[in-house]
Amino acid sequence: MKKRNLSAKKLVKLSAKEFHLYNKFEKKLSKIAKQNKLALAVSGGPDSLALSVLSKVFSLKYKIKLIALLIDHNLRKNSFKEITTVSNELKKFQIKTKILKIKSKITSNLHATARQMRYELMINFCKKNKIKYLLIGHQNDDVIENFYIRLSRGSGLFGLAPIEVIKKYKSIEFIRPLLDFKKKDLSKIASKNFNSILKDPSNSKDVYLRSRIRKLKNQLEREGLNQDRINSTLANLASAKSAIEHFTRVAEKKYLLKNGRKMTINKKLFTNEPYEIRFRVLSNLFLKLSKKDFPPRSKSINRLINLCNGKRISKMTLGGYIFANGHKNVIVFRENRV
């Protein structure tokens, strides 16, 4: 049967205020308006369902093929049934779906492990199907919760700064267009358009730090630490991070020199530049050399800084690369593995 080619206003239910939110959403995605394919990460919760609605309007306007990626985490008895229900709901909006299943059992660190597994599944699907961009439904409440979680762990500036709207993981660009959208607004869009909205039971369990932070956040709001004030602090942190990134790029051009397969670090970096710049230069260098998405732990970078500052240690190995300490330079080259 031939599908009806419906307009956005006939297909989705949005108030005038919500169409104003859509306009803000569309501006965030101006970079990808000329793409012919776009993937969405959909959990079945209110945030990702609202993302689906806004993305559908966007895809109709710019004639983009949309596919929603749903993950069966295999954590509950009825998990496949639940995610199939979400898939059927999305199909009512003429959104193509693909259910990806996590086959191995998650035994520890539930949230972090599940996130890593689903990211790997979605990245592999996007690569296989030549999709460059994946939309993620993280919203402003998530940003603030992340801030409190990282604050509780003693994170520095780069850890406390907000999630970036666009971040590349293994050649796929993750785009988070809802970071300044409030959860209550997204929940209204989702409930207006979908009959079935999934709730993650782990969200209310105090055994998880995020759940405890969520409850604590409500208390802090009553003391004046409301959403707007935290967002103002996050904007200041993002500005400071941007400044450090700028001076890090300046230092990289000044002190790093590529010579064939080797990289030379001028040791003046460690006498002329403040600690944070040294740290960022070495961290970025490791990412470029290793082609990994995340740098090594701070402890390893600090050991490397101590090596480059001192004269006692001649060399150290980090992530498959040897850092050889010389008089004026540190020479970096790949470790020969038999």
Image (tube, helix red, strand yellow):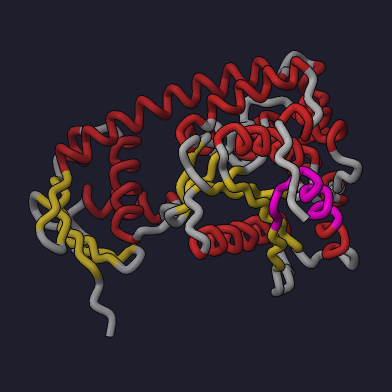
* Quadrant placement of the C terminus: bottom left
| Image coordinates for residue 187, horizontal then vertical, percent | 81, 31
**Picture residue at 82% right of the left edge, 26% below the top:** 218
* Quadrant placement of the N terminus: bottom right
Residue 90 located left or right of residue 306: right
| Residues in magenta, as a range | 85-97
Q: Quadrant of residue 160?
A: top right
Q: Is residue 91 magenta?
A: yes
Q: Is residue 136 magenta?
A: no
| Image coordinates for residue 56, horizontal then vertical, percent | 67, 38
Name the one closer to the observer, 233 or 132: 132
**Picture residue at 16% right of the left edge, 42% below the top:** 255
**Picture residue at 81% right of the left edge, 46% below the top:** 92
Can the viewer see residue 148?
no
Q: Quadrant of residue 219?
A: top right
| Image coordinates for residue 112, horizontal then vertical, percent | 65, 55
Q: Quadrant of residue 220?
A: top right
Quick one: which residue is furthest to the front in this view?
A: 2
